Image: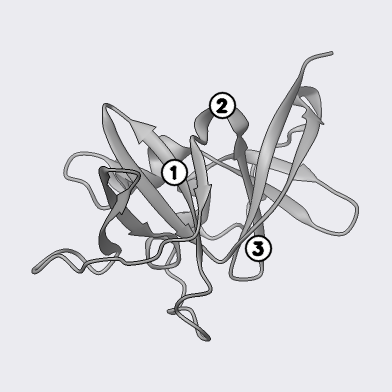
Amino acid sequence: MSSTEYVTFQIGTQTFGTSVLEVHDVFRPTKVTKVPLSKPDIAGVLNLRGRIVTAIDARARLGLPPREGDPDDIMAIGIEQNGESFGLIIDSVGEVVRLEENDMEQNPVNLDPIWASVSKGVHRMDDKLLIVMDIGRILAVGEPDEGLAA
């Protein structure tokens, strides 16, 4: 059987995961600079080891309310997509888990449509459901000719 290692992370109360091969960095954003006239789900840009990275607010992309609490207590996962660098701002990072590909199930029919649009499927874990995030789709949400309309 074939298995995949996933980096797990929390957005709101939900646990998500994405392949370790898609994650280049896990970091704590120090200074996010707002971009005038950008969409609400674009948190801004930041400097990550000399690279300018677009910071995307995962909560806003998923239709969740803004995060409460200390704004300095956020995490991000660094992603490269089509030659661009992104920092997906999340609530917290979990652990790396290895799961069997054959155990991944289709999205439940009652999964929120926005969440379903960025999910490759789900894994049932002991006490929670792990939504396997499609990084390409979460980055495309809100882009012209892509995202939810596709």
Tell me which numbered mark, 2 or 1, is placed earlier along the sequence: 2
Alpha-carbon span between mark 3 and mark 2? 21 Å
Which of the two discs, 3 and 1, sits closer to the camera? 1
Residue designated by label 3: 14
Query: Which kind of residue does numbered mark 1 sit on?
Result: Gly
Q: Nearer the viewer, residue 14 or 71?
A: 71
Is 74 left or right of 13, judged from the image as shown? Answer: left
Residue 78 - label: 1
Q: How is the image coloured?
A: one colour
- Residue 61 position within the rendered picture, expressed as x and y whole percent measured from the top left: 38, 60
What crowding class fits label 2: few (fewer than 14 Cα within 10 Å), some (14-19), or many (20 or more)?
Answer: few
Tell me which numbered mark, 3 or 1, is placed earlier along the sequence: 3
Q: Secondary structure at mark 1?
A: strand
What crowding class fits label 1: few (fewer than 14 Cα within 10 Å), some (14-19), or many (20 or more)?
Answer: many
Image quadrant in which you'd find residue 103: top right
Q: Residue furthest bottom?
A: 69
